[in-house]
Image (cartoon, helix red, strand yellow):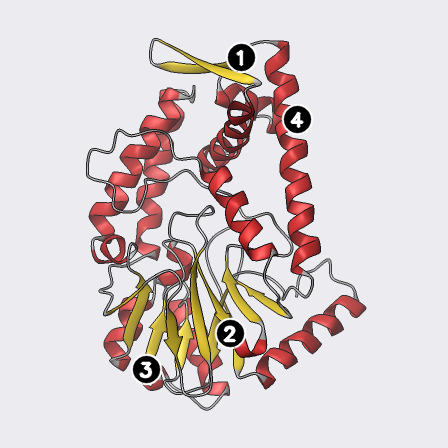
Amino acid sequence: MSAEDGPGEADDELETLALAEQAGIIRLAIPTPFQVGRVNAYLIEDSPLTLVDSGPNSAKALDELEQALGARGHAVEDIELLVISHQHMDHFGLASILARRSGAEVAALEGLAPFLAGYGEQTDLEDVFAEQMMLRHGIPPEIVTALRAVSAGFRAWGSQVEVSRLLADGSQLQLRDRTLRVLHRPGHSPSDTVFFDESRSILLSADHLIAHISSNPLLARPLGAGATYDGPRPQALIAYLASLEQTRAMDLSLVLPGHGKPITDHVALIDERFRLHRRRAEKIQRLIAARPRTAHEIAQQLWGNVAVTQAYLTLSEVLGHVDLLLEEGVVVEHAQDGVVRFASA
């Protein structure tokens, strides 16, 4: 429950969570050190006893997870299946500790498994990729250097983990009393995976769809990319909008997100997201029409001088919307001295 929720909204949230509990799916809100706040792990009281996502690698997160499990009559050692939704550390950081203590099987999308197994090396490659993106799109070197240091400091919130059960898009996770359909929904990250409890029309959406904030389509190296990836810039927002289209077409009674409260009308929320991205793309188009700009200059026009920790986030936002304009043919990009500027077509 967020601070801005009124009594009616809080009652609705509790009521909706009670419906999920009746279906055997329990939300465990785990603390994180990040601006987004608590992350939702979901305990599925079935056989095997299943936990979807773990929270970050911290003593506080582990302590609160143990307390939440204890309140349901369980212990970490009882977990039999641990499912990981995607590659962001607030969702898998504790996975290694939980798997070691419980002996649980660890399940994740097949393309995500190498990232999790090689977490340290993979984050190094992500940092190199991000640095190249930032310099190419006009972020000053001193900010890039500072952001690399911040990224290095965050790494301890994640941890390497071996995946023992590989999941394919469209495959099924069969539990005793339910079937979870595995659906790859890239965009927010390349590995975003949602899990559909088909018989109950409940979707565990992780960060693919969140009620109170728009999921940021973050620029990241494609899954399986080699150590020296030099392919085209990933089109994270275009991929995300295509994923949202697929989710919009689903018949869902309830969506349980990775942060915040449950979602009971996913179609209305997704339509609102589509309108938000269209408005932002049009605003960026007007800025580019005034004069050619780098993505960093566009971000400054939109949000001012943002904190260093937000520089890559805002760059991803701008480039995602510029990709929409490039696809429509209303904007072109020109590179000079290694820096890209966007201009009206």
Considering only vertical position in the picture, is 108 above or below 36? Answer: below
The picture quadrant where one finds residue 282 is: top right
Q: Secondary structure at mark 3?
A: loop
The earlier-in-sequence mark between 1 and 2 is 2
**Between 127 and 209, which is closer to the camera in this rendering?**
209
Q: Element type at marker 4?
A: helix
- For this view, does 140 lie left or right of residue 112? right
Q: CA gap, disc 3 to disc 2?
A: 18 Å
Measured as percent of width and height from the top left, residue 117 is found at 21, 58
Amino acid of disc 4: Glu
Q: CA distance from mark 2 to mark 4?
A: 37 Å
Q: In whole angstroms, how far apart are the C-alphas of marks 3 and 1?
A: 54 Å
Q: Nearer the viewer, mark 1 or mark 2?
A: 2
Image vertical order of residue 153 relative to residue 9, above or below: above
Q: Mark 2 is on which residue type? A: Asp
Separation (CA) of disc 1 from disc 2:
46 Å
Around disc 1, counting alpha carbons within 10 Å, would you say few (fewer than 14), some (14 to 19), or many (20 or more)?
Answer: many
Return the disc, 3 or 1, that comes first in the chain's sequence.
3
Q: Residue at x 49, y 29 (%)?
A: 319
Q: To which residue does mark 2 refer?
A: 197
Q: Earlier in the sequence, mark 2 or mark 4?
A: 2
Residue at the spot 44% in from the left edge and 69% down from the top edge? 181
Instruction: Find disc 3 in the rendering and name its residue.
Output: 80
Q: Amino acid at mark 1?
A: Ala
Percent of width and height locating residue 326: 51, 23
Q: Which mark is residue 343?
A: 1
N-terminal-most mark, 3 or 2? 3
Per the rendering, the mark at residue 282 is 4
Q: Position of residue 221 (x, y in %)?
A: 32, 40
